[in-house]
Amino acid sequence: MRWKYFYWSIIALALVMSSIEATTQYRNGLYVKSVAEEIVQKANATDNRSRVIALRDYLRGHVSFQGAPMDDRPFLRASAAETLRSGKGYCGEVTRAFIRMADAVGIRAQRINLYGRVNHVVAEVELRPGERVIVDNQNPPLLHELEPLDHVILRPEYTDYSTLNLRRLRLSWLVSRIKLEIGPLTYWSESPHALEASLWLAVALILLLGKFLFICARPLARVLLIRRGWVKPADNIVLKVSEANRGVRPVVDQAGD
């Protein structure tokens, strides 16, 4: 019986953790949206280009990699809200903050990893259909102005790029210069708490599904085995089951009475 309590405890824990991470993500989203809207309003930005520049300049002035921890960094880096609150972060963290802020004001953006003499993380923004530019939000920036990815990759310091960080995934040997349009998946890849909430929920659902399949499959497997003749139940067991179903108390024949 103890393993059953342990099993249900794991499911309950996964659901609780999923709820905590989802709540954190919701609150962080509200905070990032409020900051982004305030920046755009103060800059009197009326088009996508001016909004992008306003958000970029704010991040360059308020987030710095100086003093940010370098060792023992988690696989899932800081969220956009955590970077904005702390004012600390490297190119990856500040790019995440920009992508989430851009999304909050209706601008599509995604991460681009640049490789070469100096590895760097930037954002690619869609100003309008067919016009995309690279935005470097780090201070000091390596790319000062907005320019297309095709122009950036011609710089001598860069030789490769990818949407996903293939080098962290140990897949850079497989492909090069690959850019994916991940669309809605950008939300999950740039929202660590949302991703963790989904993973915890997936754990709970998988365990529940496993329990359901176990409960359903057990009697079905028993019936199948009996029909195949692979299992032959004892006659007295069948008698007791049938009598129990009819509410009749079985009579035990005692030999020699």
Image (cartoon, grey):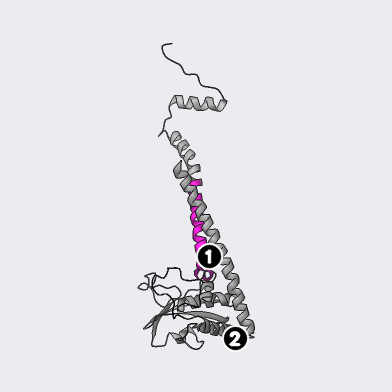
Mark 2 Cα shell of 10 Å, populated few (<14), some (14-19), many (≥20):
some
Examine the rendering and report whether any part of residue 61 can be seen: yes
How far across and down, in percent of the image, does residue 178 sit?
Answer: 43, 76
- Looking at the rendering, the stretch of residues picked out in magenta corresponds to 184-211
Which quadrant of the figure contains the C terminus? top left
48 vs 153, nearest the viewer: 48
- The tag on residue 50 is 2
Numbered circle sitting on residue 194: 1
Q: Residue at x 47, y 36 (%)?
A: 223
Q: Amino acid at mark 2?
A: Ser
Query: Which label sits on residue 234?
Result: none
Residue at image point 54% right, 83% down: 56
Q: Earlier in the sequence, mark 1 or mark 2?
A: 2
Q: How far apart, in angstroms, are the residues tagged by discs 1 and 2?
A: 29 Å
Q: Quadrant of residue 226?
A: top left
Q: Amino acid at mark 1?
A: Ala
Q: Is residue 156 above or below residue 36?
A: below
